[in-house]
Amino acid sequence: MNIRRYEPWGVLNQLSNEMNSLFANTGQQLNDPSTMATSDWVPAVDIQEEKDRYLIKADIPGVKPDDIEIHMENDVLTIKGERSAEDVTEGNGYKRVERIRGTFHRRFTLPDTADADRISASSRDGVLEVVIPKQQKVQPRRINVEG
């Protein structure tokens, strides 16, 4: 006779683990406030702070610059757009479709040092680059001490 440990929460823990892996495989980060529930997909982003600016790079292959909207309101930068859907029926030669189509939506709260009036954006080779300059008054300045 084998002794087996009884774990009353084992089934629920297993279900929780399976749900977490399901969401991890879709690329959706559940705890990330920059994603929206209305998005079909979420582009990966890199956020970098430099001496005189902030830089956001987002992977958006297949999205035309005309299909991207960027708004700044109340210190929140919103990037949204859409990757156009193609006819992906098996009759057109498709055997497998993995690239997600549809809308995306990301929001970022910017620090008080951001200069909202000088934000610029460009898209090249499937990467959206948003440049957010810092305000002039907050940039560090070296003061010489005379002696």
Image (cartoon, grey):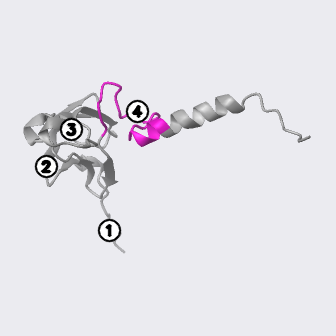
What whole-number distance in Å separates the C-alpha atoms at marks 1 and 4? 43 Å
**Image location of residue 112, percent across then percent down:** 33, 39
Q: Nearer the viewer, residue 9 or 64?
A: 9
Marks 3/1 in contact by CB < 8 Å: the verdict is no
Magenta highlight on residue 16: no
Image quarter (top left, top right, bottom left or bottom right) of the N terminus: top right
Magenta part mainly helix, strand or loop? loop
Magenta highlight on residue 27: yes
Amino acid marked by disc 1:
Asn
Within 10 Å of the Cα at label 4, are there few (<14), some (14-19), or many (20+) other Cα atoms? few
Which label belongs to residue 119? none
Q: Which residue appears at 29% of the width and 31% of the height?
A: 40
Image quarter (top left, top right, bottom left or bottom right) of the C terminus: bottom left
Residue 142 is drawn in which quadrant? bottom left
* The residue positioned farthest toward the top in the image shown: 38
For marks 4 and 3, the one nearer the N-term is 4
| Residue segment shown in magenta | 22-42
| Of the two numbered discs 2 and 3 in the rendering, the one whose residue sits closer to the viewer | 2
Per the image, the residue denoted by label 2 is 123
For marks 1 and 4, the one nearer the N-term is 4
Amino acid marked by disc 2:
Ser
Instruction: Name the secondary structure under disc 2.
Output: strand
Q: Classify residue 44 as left or right of residue 90.
A: right
For marks 2 and 1, the one nearer the N-term is 2
Within 10 Å of the Cα at label 3, are there few (<14), some (14-19), or many (20+) other Cα atoms? many
Per the image, the residue denoted by label 4 is 33
Instruction: Name the secondary structure under disc 1.
Output: loop
Amino acid marked by disc 4:
Pro
Marks 1/4 in contact by CB < 8 Å: the verdict is no
Instruction: Name the secondary structure under disc 3.
Output: helix
**Image location of residue 100, percent across then percent down:** 26, 38
